[in-house]
Amino acid sequence: MYDPTRAKARRIEIGLSVRQVADRVGVSETTVYAWESGDRTPTLDHYVYLAHALRIPFDGLMRQAEEAGMVPDLLAAEWSRKRTADAESTIRDSDDADTRLFVDQIYGSLR
């Protein structure tokens, strides 16, 4: 499911630094660098947080999970993420992802 090249390209495309991704996922910058270089693979729980940080729609994750036969595991990881106090609502589709990205960009320009 995880593709380090696509993850790094997506991070750059939406203008996030490695530090910002690490903060959003709750890991160190070294861990994000290891994921992007392909030296390590995120756990499924971290992958769900990473997908939210990179504004990847959940419907896309579901398709990938279906192909890998991992739908129950993905749903369990998403449920676990949603139980945390600061969890955002699920980005269901590409329209949600585009909206969130736009809001992030506006919010970032106001800082």
Image: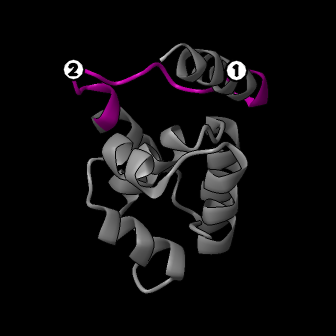
Residue 30's place in the image compared with 89, above or below, is below
The residue lying at 52 percent from left, 25 percent from top is: 90
Residue 12's place in the image compared with 36, above or below, is above
Residue lying at the far bottom of the rendered structure: 39
Q: Crowding near pointer 1: few (<14 within 10 Å), some, many (20+)?
A: few
Q: Of label 2 and label 1, which has the lower sequence position?
A: 2
Q: Which mark identifies residue 13?
A: none
Which residue in the structure is indicated by mark 1? 102
Q: Quadrant of residue 7?
A: bottom right
44 lies left or right of 71: left
The residue lying at 37 percent from left, 41 percent from top is: 24
Residue 91 horizontal/vertical position (percent): 59, 27
Mark 2 against mark 1, which lies toward the viewer? 1
11 lies left or right of 45: right
Q: Crowding near pointer 2: few (<14 within 10 Å), some, many (20+)?
A: few
What secondary structure prevails in the magenta region? loop
Which residue in the structure is indicated by mark 2? 85
